[in-house]
Image: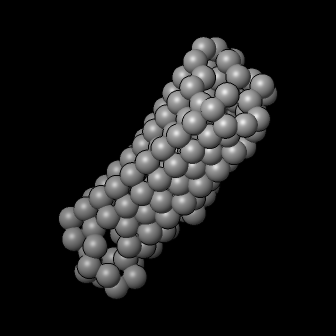
């Protein structure tokens, strides 16, 4: 439903697209589906992904082959060419740059906004972990917690408003 929603779909199955150009480029001839896209340009570039939920204008807009991801909010997982699987991004621009990252949970406006290839991170709170890029296995909870931590920290637990701001540069701090 919507102008050019599921525009290029040939034989995909069980897809739902609501909004202008939602799931626009889905399916380059592969029999895949079970994706839900709600909002203008939601999952716009998705081609062969399976089981994704994308709600909000430009959410997962540049995702291509990603599967089993949930993006809820304006531009959540919105810029990166998402190929990673099993990510959850809830909040305006959460996981904005995500590309090949897997198994991340990002909740809150701009949480994990610069994360690209990180794996297994839990970032909860507005701007939580926005400095992370390729980091793995971190738990960061609180508004602006770990916001300017070094891009590749590993295995840290950071809790509280502004905790770990710029102080983290290594693993397991």
In percent of the image, x 69 and y 17: which residue is there?
A: 162
Q: How many numbered marks have been drawn onto this rendered protein structure?
A: 0
The answer to whether one can see residue 49 in this image is yes
Give the answer, above or below, for where 134 lies relative to 61. above
The colour style of the image is: one colour
Residue nearest the observer in this picture, 82 or 172: 172
Q: Is residue 59 left or right of residue 53?
A: right
Q: Where residue 91 sits in the image (x, y, percent)?
A: 50, 34
Q: Is residue 94 visible?
A: no
Q: Quadrant of residue 31?
A: bottom left
Residue 59 x, y percent position in the rendering: 49, 50
In the rendered image, the residue lying farthest to the top is 160
Q: Which of the 4 quarters of the picture holds residue 170?
A: top right
27 on left or right of 140: left
Q: Up-down: is 76 above or below 15?
A: above
Q: Position of residue 68 (x, y in %)?
A: 34, 55
Q: Is residue 128 above or below residue 104?
A: above
Q: Position of residue 54 (x, y in %)?
A: 40, 50
Q: Residue at x 62, y 45 (%)?
A: 135
Residue farthest to the front?
172
Q: Residue at x 48, y 68 (%)?
A: 64
**Could you tell whether 28 is left or right of 168 in the image?**
left
Look at the image and tell me in which quarter the C terminus lies: top right
Q: Residue furthest bottom?
A: 29
């Amino acid at each position: 439903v919507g102008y050019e929603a599921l525009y290029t779909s040939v034989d995909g199955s069980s897809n739902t697209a609501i909004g202008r150009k939602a799931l626009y480029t889905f399916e380059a001839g592969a029999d895949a589906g079970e994706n839900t896209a709600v909002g203008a340009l939601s999952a716009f570039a998705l081609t062969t992904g399976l089981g994704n939920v994308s709600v909000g204008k430009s959410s997962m807009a540049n995702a291509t082959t990603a599967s089993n991801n949930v993006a809820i909010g304006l531009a959540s997982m919105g810029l990166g060419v998402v190929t990673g699987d099993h990510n959850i991004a809830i909040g305006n621009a959460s996981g904005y740059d995500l590309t090949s990252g897997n198994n991340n949970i990002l909740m809150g406006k701009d949480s994990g906004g610069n994360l690209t290839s990180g794996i297994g991170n839990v970032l909860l709170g507005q701007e939580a972990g926005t400095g992370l890029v390729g980091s793995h296995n971190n738990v960061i909870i609180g508004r602006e917690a770990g916001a300017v931590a070094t891009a590749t920290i590993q295995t840290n637990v950071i809790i509280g408003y502004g905790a770990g701001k710029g102080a983290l540069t290594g693993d397991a701090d």
